[in-house]
Structure formats: structure tokens, C-alpha cells
């Protein structure tokens, strides 16, 4: 029996946009999802921006994505912490995307005996803030990080990102963080819950084998790898797992929206 695709999860950078330009087929893909009434979420490991910020960024590229259809590692982290310890407290290294998500989840942001140290993405990591995080973790705070990405892009080249800073804190404290974002399937499962979708009838679209595809597989979803981002076709053979399908770009999936899988 052929299964229909009822719900869609898609990565953002490398799938829908690249360097603030919409990729071919992205606008048509989003339009098809909305026209067919398919539940969908756009996922990103970036914790800097709020969904409102990201909606504005996507709108500027010509993509009409509702604010509530964007799911970030910051939102997934806030949901995870709420499930773990409702109304807790956290010392946060991060920007508005993370602090806003935690605040709206009912968390108190403090440096005074917090329950958690939460590390996210920021454009400028403060040595003083990292030192404070180390001392709080040594004092018993639990260590959470939004995502394990070690570098992030900039116009001048790679920047150290959450995973790299987490490694420094781990070296000083001997405490490994719990990473919430991809490739942790936790982020995929929280996204499924967000749109009330089932893994058997939802697919994950991504451009990276080591985050998008493996997270989708571990969450029990079918996976589509697009070749407009990080992973090239010849790279796939290096991994011990495979996507369900490989397509050139998101344009190849427009006609799959609303049709049997």
C-alpha cells in the first residue's frame, strides 16, 4: 500500500535559501504546501533569531512562510527544558531567539544558582560569560546546548559556533552538554508534536546527511536529500545510512505535495 505524505519538515538554509536568496522551486514548494493545506514546519539549528525575525528574512527572499511554521533549535530547547523542569531557571549565552523562547516558556534568566546553563549561538562570544558558565556548571548547573554545529558562516569565512564553544566549556568542566538541535531526533519529534503529525506519514527534507537526514531517520521519517546545500551526491557513500531519496533541489518535490509518496 502506497503511503501519502501528510506532513512535511524541511531544513531552511541549503534547501529553501542560500545566502539570502531563495533557491529555485522554494516559493512554489511553500505555495503548494499552503494550497494543499499540508501541515509543515521549516527547521533551523540557528538559535540567534526569533521566528518573527526569520519570517522577515524569508519574506525578503520572496518566500511566504507563517511565523508559526518556523521551528528553531531555541524553541526546541525551550520546549525540552519545560518538559524537564517547568518554570525553572537558566543562565543563557545567546541572543534574542534563545532568550525570548526561554522567557516565553516561563523560565527565569539568572546567574544566581540557575538550574541550567544554556548555550546557544551568538555573534560575539564573551570570555566573561563563558567563564561564568564554567563556574556555574562546576557549581552544579546542568549543561544544555541548542545545537552541536562547530562553525557558522560569515562574509569573511567560518565563525566559531555553539559546538566549538561547548567543547571549550566541556574541557574546563568535564561536563558534556545535552545538545537539543539536529542531529538529535528530539528536535524532529518536537516538531512533529508541534504540527500534530505522525512519523509514518511525515517526511524530512534536508541538505546535510550528518544532521537533517540522520535526525529524520532516527525519528522514523522518510528523508529527502537535496543537493543544493552542503552534501554532494558523491559524499553520500561515505555515510553508513542512506536517505530515502536524493533529488537535485526542492523544485523536484513541488509535485509531490498532495500526491502519494
Image (cartoon, helix red, strand yellow):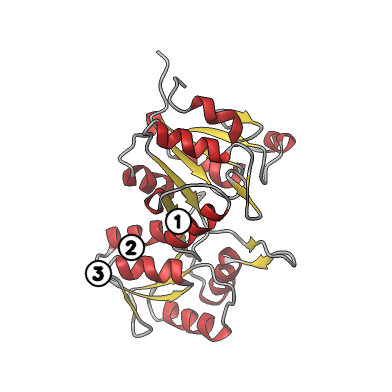
Percent from the top left, x then y, of residue 145?
47, 64
In the picture, which quadrant includes the N terminus?
top left
- Nearer the observer: mark 3 or 1; the answer is 1
Residue drawn at point x = 58 percent, y = 71 percent: 165
Q: Which residue is mark 2?
A: 81
Percent from the top left, x then y, of residue 206?
56, 41
Give the secondary structure at mark 2.
helix
Q: Is residue 9 left or right of residue 236?
A: left
Q: Please, is residue 180 above or below residue 220 in the view?
A: below
Percent from the top left, x then y, of residue 115?
33, 74
Q: CA distance from mark 3 to mark 1?
A: 20 Å
Residue drawn at point x = 45 percent, y = 71 percent: 96
Q: Please, is residue 71 above or below residue 168 in the view?
A: above
Q: CA distance from mark 1 to mark 2?
A: 14 Å
Q: Which residue is mark 1?
A: 72
Residue drawn at point x = 34 percent, y = 85 percent: 112
Q: Is residue 12 left or right of residue 230?
A: left
Q: Please, is residue 57 above or below residue 138 in the view?
A: above
Percent from the top left, x then y, of residue 46?
52, 59
Q: Please, is residue 220 above or below residue 188 in the view?
A: above
Amino acid at each position: 500500500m502506497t503511503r501519502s505524505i501528510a506532513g512535511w519538515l524541511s531544513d531552511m538554509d541549503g534547501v529553501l535559501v542560500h545566502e539570502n536568496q531563495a533557491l529555485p522551486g522554494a516559493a512554489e514548494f511553500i505555495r503548494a504546501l499552503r494550497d494543499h493545506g499540508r501541515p509543515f514546519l521549516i527547521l533551523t539549528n540557528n538559535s540567534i533569531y526569533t521566528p518573527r525575525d526569520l519570517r522577515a528574512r524569508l519574506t525578503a527572499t520572496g518566500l511566504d512562510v507563517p511565523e508559526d511554521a518556523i521551528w528553531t533549535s531555541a524553541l526546541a530547547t525551550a520546549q525540552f527544558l519545560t518538559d524537564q523542569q517547568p518554570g525553572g531557571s537558566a543562565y543563557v549565552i545567546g541572543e534574542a531567539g534563545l532568550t525570548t523562547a526561554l522567557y516565553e516558556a516561563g523560565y527565569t534568566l539568572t546567574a544566581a544558582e540557575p538550574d541550567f546553563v544554556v548555550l546557544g549561538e551568538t555573534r560575539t562570544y564573551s570570555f566573561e560569560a563563558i567563564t561564568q558558565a564554567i563556574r556555574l556548571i562546576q557549581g552544579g548547573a546542568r549543561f544544555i546546548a541548542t545545537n552541536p554545529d562547530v562553525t557558522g558562516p560569515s562574509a569573511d569565512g567560518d565563525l566559531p559556533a555553539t559546538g566549538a564553544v561547548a567543547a571549550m566549556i566541556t574541557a574546563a568542566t568535564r561536563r558534556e552538554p545535552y545538545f537539543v538541535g539536529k542531529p538529535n531526533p528530539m528536535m524532529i519529534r518536537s516538531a512533529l508534536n508541534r504540527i500534530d503529525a505522525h512519523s509514518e506519514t511525515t517526511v524530512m527534507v534536508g541538505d546535510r546527511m550528518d544532521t537533517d537526514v540522520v535526525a529524520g531517520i532516527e525519528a522514523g521519517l522518510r528523508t529527502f536529500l537535496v543537493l543544493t546545500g552542503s552534501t554532494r551526491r558523491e559524499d553520500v557513500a561515505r555515510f553508513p545510512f542512506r536517505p530515502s531519496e536524493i533529488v537535485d533541489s526542492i523544485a523536484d518535490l513541488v509535485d509531490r505535495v498532495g500526491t502519494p509518496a
